[in-house]
Image (cartoon, helix red, strand yellow):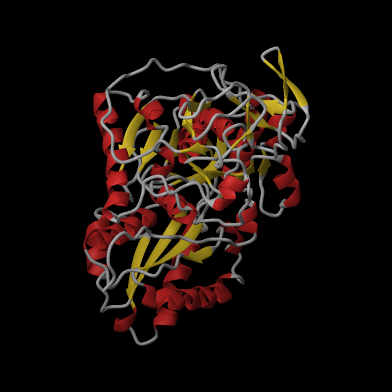
């Protein structure tokens, strides 16, 4: 197993793959270096002298400026590096040729999914209950319990993958964009192909009226999406349960069929990142993204604040000038969002990120965007919009794990690849494959983690591990449950930016 990794030839720091005690001697570029301090796993050490004010280079790009002279063998982190990020920037259109990589040959390019009447493809055959307003959250839960008491005794019960409610605190006391975003997010989820049937439950007096939700939905299949306003019926529990039983029985008649992976829309997400994220799991997911795109499928990269400092790499890969301008707007609008609340654009990474070896937002962003692989950026989508263009898409969302994951689901992603170096048990409304950046985490939290990318730091190749990860994705798309699904971690979160009445 290598003791350290130098990511790009031009880097002036290297990353420790394992704990390296003070006095350890390593050889970098045919030069021997003695480490002057203990270097924890995933942390950086200088392999060249770095003068005060000079760029610290990792991933071939600046991750910040040295705050003092840094000598060879010294630990490089928050005590001697600061971000160079500030407010909005002016950019120059500078398209670069796509550096096509030779991709590994997959074992399979098909999965067993559900072809919906509208042409979409789901990987689960579930029934979803979506409250229009938080007042109906618990009512939805009781409706499901009542319905399941009947369904479990039916011969077709095993032909559906469950009935789930997705609670949220909104739908009333919201103004402007917050109100519209709640409606758009719920409407996009209602059209998700993993849900064979959907019940939208309204109260009757809320701002987010069922009649308004129907307008936001636009064209929809009335056999698949049902509505119930609970103030209008005498027994809302039984009325809701009856609708759910009807939806479930109809869904039970649908069978999985073999379909090409070009139908897959893969969400790309990281959380609880560490210094190994950009070395193992994120670039591994980047290979998967490129493989899916090469087969005609779709990958979706979000977490806009975690593009700050790496946005130029995405802009240079824009399909055309319009997509480039859309990326510029995506980045600068999000910075303006921070500034409008009198907050710095660089208030990141988190304490856990720093403990794991990430020093600045540039450090985090350059590692984060590795998940997008090397493919051309074909489109930019707004919050709660559905993705329509095959290829690599960028999606507007904050970095918050649950908000971003929900946004990816609303965009139409049937599955999310979630990389983490610190670990998290969370799950959202679509299957979430959690990928450990290091073997220590994978072995410590096997009831959370689905896949171990840490073996990449132990001598295995990206090609062989990528083929294994694609096999796991195909298995999950064909019905295998993720660890979060087995633990029944299913939540959504809606992005709120304004006032509450």
The percent coordinates of residue 252 (x first, y second) are 52, 58
Q: Looking at the image, how many numbered discs can be counted on the residues?
A: 0
The percent coordinates of residue 48 (x first, y second) are 60, 21
Front-most of 309 and 480? 309
Which quarter of the rendering shows the N terminus? top right
On the image, which quarter does residue 140 sit in? bottom left
Q: Is residue 42 left or right of residue 134?
A: right
Residue 433 shows in the view: no
Front-most of 463 and 161? 463
Which quarter of the rendering shows the C terminus? bottom left
Residue at left offset 49%, top offset 74%: 141
The percent coordinates of residue 102 (x first, y second) are 55, 16
Residue at left offset 69%, top offset 30%: 456
Residue at left offset 29%, top offset 50%: 339
Farthest residue toward the top? 30
Above or below, 426 against 143 in this view is: above
Residue at left offset 28%, top offset 61%: 178
Residue 500 shows in the view: yes
The percent coordinates of residue 392 (x first, y second) are 41, 32
Q: Is residue 291 left or right of residue 179?
A: right
Above or below, 45 against 334 in this view is: above
Q: Is residue 69 left or right of residue 468?
A: left
Q: Is residue 87 left or right of residue 433?
A: left
């Amino acid at each position: 197993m290598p003791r350290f990794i130098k990511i790009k030839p031009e880097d002036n720091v290297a990353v420790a793959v394992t704990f390296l005690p003070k006095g350890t001697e390593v050889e970098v570029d045919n030069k021997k270096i003695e480490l002057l301090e203990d270097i924890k796993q995933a942390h950086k050490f200088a392999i060249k002298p770095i003068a005060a004010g000079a760029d610290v280079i990792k991933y071939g790009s600046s991750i910040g400026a040295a705050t003092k002279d840094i000598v060879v063998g010294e630990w490089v982190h928050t005590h001697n590096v600061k971000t160079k990020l500030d407010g909005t920037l002016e950019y120059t259109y500078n398209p670069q040729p796509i550096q096509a990589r030779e991709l590994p040959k997959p074992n399979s390019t098909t999965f067993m999914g559900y072809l919906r009447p509208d042409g979409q493809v789901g990987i689960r055959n579930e029934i979803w209950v979506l409250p229009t307003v938080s007042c109906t959250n618990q009512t939805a839960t009781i409706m499901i319990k009542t319905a399941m008491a009947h369904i479990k005794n039916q011969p077709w019960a095993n032909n559906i993958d469950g009935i789930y409610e997705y609670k949220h605190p909104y739908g009333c006391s919201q103004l402007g964009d917050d109100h519209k975003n709640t409606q758009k997010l719920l409407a996009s989820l209602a059209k998700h192909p993993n849900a064979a049937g959907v019940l939208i439950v309204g109260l009757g007096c809320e701002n987010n009226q069922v009649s308004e939700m129907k307008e936001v939905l636009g064209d929809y299949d009335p056999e698949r999406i049902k509505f119930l306003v609970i103030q209008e019926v005498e027994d809302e529990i039984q009325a809701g349960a009856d609708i759910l039983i009807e939806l479930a029985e109809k869904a039970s008649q649908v069978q999985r069929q073999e379909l090409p992976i070009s139908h897959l829309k893969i969400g790309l997400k990281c959380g609880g990142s560490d210094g190994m994220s950009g070395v193992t799991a994120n670039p591994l997911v980047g290979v998967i993204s490129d493989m899916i795109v090469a087969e005609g499928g779709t990958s979706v990269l979000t977490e806009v604040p975690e593009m700050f400092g790496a946005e130029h790499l995405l802009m240079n890969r824009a399909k055309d000038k319009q997509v480039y301008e859309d990326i510029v707007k995506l980045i600068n609008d999000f910075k303006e969002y921070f500034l409008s609340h009198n907050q710095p654009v660089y208030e990141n990474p988190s304490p856990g990120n720093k403990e794991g070896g990430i020093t600045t937002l540039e450090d985090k962003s350059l590692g984060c965007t590795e998940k997008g692989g090397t493919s051309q950026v074909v489109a930019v989508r707004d919050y709660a919009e559905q993705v329509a263009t095959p290829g690599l898409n960028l999606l507007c969302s904050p970095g918050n794990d649950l908000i971003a994951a929900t946004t990816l689901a609303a965009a139409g992603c049937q599955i999310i690849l979630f990389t983490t170096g610190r670990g998290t048990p969370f799950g959202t409304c679509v299957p979430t494959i959690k990928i450990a950046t290091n073997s220590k985490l994978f072995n410590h939290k096997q009831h959370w983690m689905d896949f171990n990318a840490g073996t990449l730091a132990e001598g295995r190749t990206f090609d062989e591990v990528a083929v294994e990860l694609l096999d796991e994705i195909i298995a999950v798309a064909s019905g295998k449950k993720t660890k979060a699904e087995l633990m029944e971690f299913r939540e959504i979160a809606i992005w709120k930016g304004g006032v509450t009445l």
